[in-house]
Image (spheres, grey):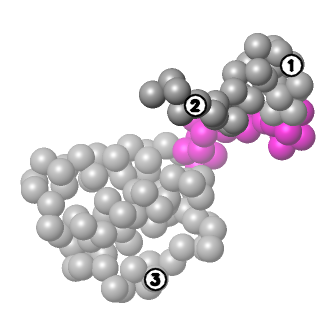
Amino acid sequence: MLPSDLKPEQFNGYPPEARKLVTDYVGALQRLPLSFVPSLLREVIDYDFRFPPERKAIEKELANLKSLSGDHSATPFRQIRAPPLSTLRDAASSSLRTRSPACASSRIAVAQPRKISPLAR
């Protein structure tokens, strides 16, 4: 489910105060990136059982998100870009090819333990 698909009735199972809070801010939640919404909802679902300063922090966070107008709510997240998967694969295979021979010999030495002669004990 995408954040844009969230509806107030989907929060009927939340405790009473958390349900009221989340339904008041469902519009703000709908504009957020998918990766951000689950952690925020985990905070909200426990709202009824939190201390007053923790409640204020959640309310303030939701109010700040709501105050961002329309398209600006996701603006800070738009700057985050993941490199293409092909770039990651190329970097990994390049890293494996360019390791020095000294590293290779030490890996072999670790992988093949030495035999200790009975006289060395």
SS for dot 3: helix
**Crowding at mark 2 (Cα within 10 Å: few <14, some 14-19, many 20+):** few
Report the amino acid beneath label 1.
Answer: Thr
CB under 8 Å between discs 2 and 3: no
Mark 1 residue crowding within 10 angstroms, few (<14) / some (14–19) / many (20+): few
Residue sitting nearer the eye, 58 or 111: 111
Marks 2 and 3: which is nearer the front? Answer: 2
Who's the residue at 10% across and 56% down the image? 51
- Is residue 75 visible to us here? no
- Quarter occupied by the C terminus: top left
Q: Mark 2 points at which residue?
A: 116
The residue carrying mark 3 is 10
Instruction: Give the mark nearest the N terminus, 2 or 1.
Output: 1
Percent x, y of residue 56 = 19, 49
Kindly indicate the quadrant of the structure image that contains residue 100: top right
Which residue is at a point 83% across and 43% down the rendered structure image? 85
Please say whether residue 68 is visible from this viewpoint.
yes
Q: Measure how far apart labels 2 and 1 are at the Cα level.
A: 33 Å
Foreground disc of the pair 1, 3: 1
The crowd level at tag 3 (other Cα within 10 Å; few <14, some 14-19, many 20+) is: few
* Residue interval drawn in magenta: 70-90
Q: Name the residue type under label 2.
A: Ile
Q: Residue 98 carries which label?
A: 1
Q: How far apart are marks 2 and 3 (CA)?
A: 67 Å
Marks 1 and 3 close (CB-CB < 8 Å): no
Q: Where is residue 23 in the image (x, y as percent from the top left)?
A: 38, 72
Q: Of label 1 and label 3, which has the lower sequence position?
A: 3
Q: Is residue 4 above or below residue 60?
A: below
